[in-house]
Image (cartoon, rainbow, N blue to C red):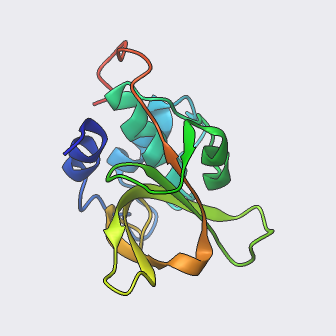
Amino acid sequence: MNNVLDIALGEYGVTEVVGKKHNPRILTYFKAIGHRWVTTDETAWCSAFANFVALKAGYALSGKLNARSWLKVGTKVKIPQQGDVVIFWREKRNSWKGHVGFFIGYSEDKKYIYVLGGNQNNQVNIKPYPTYRLLGFRSIKKTFRPLFDAA
């Protein structure tokens, strides 16, 4: 398994807190990548999670909170490997909305892509997404040695 998946799996089960309180771990994802203004775990956080994992691993990251920003990171790949970034559209193919996570594999019939990601039913988990919503796969590589422990 690669470093990105090891780090992401270490966050497995982190869940939003319902109500006025917020999970400090999710807020750490935002703070570690420079978005200290975010104070609620209700803010869409799939890209914050992907950025946090990439940062902690020393890999290329988008630094942005929109999932589609990952379409410009790393190298486009047609045949993904476990741990590659996977980006989906949400609501409409041409909307700005999306989802990002790390590729785990395909369902047997290839109709679904299993993704390890954040903000999947309000938690870090592995979830299937329909293949028809795929925007792309990106291979990210180690680009720097982390300057600090993202915790």
Q: Which image quarter: residue 21?
A: bottom left
Q: Residue furthest right?
A: 94
| Residue 37 vertical placement versus 78 (above, below) | above
- Residue at figure coordinates x 27%, y 47% from the top left: 5
| Residue 142 vertical placement versus 20 (above, below) | above
Front residue (pair 118, 126):
126
Please state the horizontal and vertical placement of residue 149, each as a whole percent of the image: 29, 22
4 vs 54, left or right, is left
2 vs 106, left or right, is left
Front residue (pair 39, 111):
111
Q: Which image quarter: residue 146?
A: top left
Total count of labels: 0
Q: Residue furthest front?
A: 79
Please state the horizontal and vertical placement of residue 57, each as a whole percent of the image: 33, 30
| Residue 32 vertical placement versus 51 (above, below) | above
Residue 83 seen by the camera: yes
- Residue at figure coordinates x 33%, y 67% from the top left: 105
16 vs 35, left or right, is left
Please state the horizontal and vertical placement of residue 53, each as a whole percent of the image: 37, 39
Name the image quarter holding the C terminus.
Answer: top left
- Residue at figure coordinates x 55%, y 28% from the top left: 34
- Residue at figure coordinates x 55%, y 33% from the top left: 36
Front residue (pair 27, 137):
137
40 vs 103, left or right, is right
Q: Which image quarter: residue 97?
A: bottom right
Residue 40 seen by the camera: no
Please state the horizontal and vertical placement of residue 59, each as a whole percent of the image: 42, 29
